[in-house]
Image (cartoon, rainbow, N blue to C red):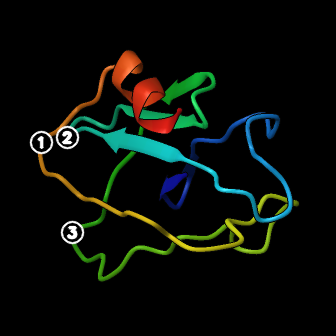
Amino acid sequence: MNFAANVNLTTTGAEWKPNGQLNKVAACLDSVGNMALCVNGGTVYTRTGGSLSPSATHFVLSNNGAATLPLNGWTEKFSISPNLWLSNSDLVALTK
């Protein structure tokens, strides 16, 4: 997850399923820059320092051509909710 040009929130890669299998991903970012990410019910990764630019015009769902972890497939659901912070247990439950 890249929430700003200089702040990335990444996983170890072990959580991702290969060969186009369904990967479930949940993430959140609050107004002060706290970020959380969970993939396939695994570890919840957190970091501070995130931001969304007021001039942002779109979201890109991809790995930007890096590494070997592309999304590879359909996006079944993509939701944006203002002022919603998910607990670690919520993130895990959403991605199992």
Q: Look at the numbered discs 3 and 2 and tell me whether their residues touch, using CB distance below 8 Å.
A: no
Q: Nearer the viewer, mark 1 or mark 2?
A: 1
Q: Which residue is tagged 3?
A: 54
Above or below, 84 against 73 in this view is above
Q: Quadrant of residue 39?
A: top right
Dot 3 falls on a residue whose secondary structure is: loop
Tell me what residue is drawn at x 28 percent, y 59 percent.
Answer: 79
Q: Which residue is tagged 1?
A: 83
Question: Residue extending furthest left?
Answer: 83
Query: In the rendering, at what x and y percent does residue 52 appear?
Result: 31, 58
Dot 1 falls on a residue whose secondary structure is: loop
Tell me what residue is drawn at x 52 percent, y 46 percent.
Answer: 25
Alpha-carbon span between mark 1 and mark 2: 8 Å
**What numbered label is drawn on residue 31?**
2
Question: Residue extending furthest bottom?
Answer: 57
Question: Residue extending furthest top?
Answer: 89
Dot 2 falls on a residue whose secondary structure is: loop
Query: In the rendering, at what x and y percent does residue 80 appear?
Result: 24, 58
Q: Look at the numbered discs 1 and 2 and tell me whether their residues touch, using CB distance below 8 Å.
A: yes
- The amino acid pointed to by label 1 is Asn
Sooner in the amino-acid sequence: mark 3 or mark 2: 2
Alpha-carbon span between mark 3 and mark 2: 12 Å
Q: Label 2: how many residues lie within 10 Å, few (<14), some (14-19) or many (20+)?
A: few
Above or below, 58 against 46 in this view is below
Looking at this view, is 66 or 41 the one in front? Answer: 41
Q: Label 1: how many residues lie within 10 Å, few (<14), some (14-19) or many (20+)?
A: few
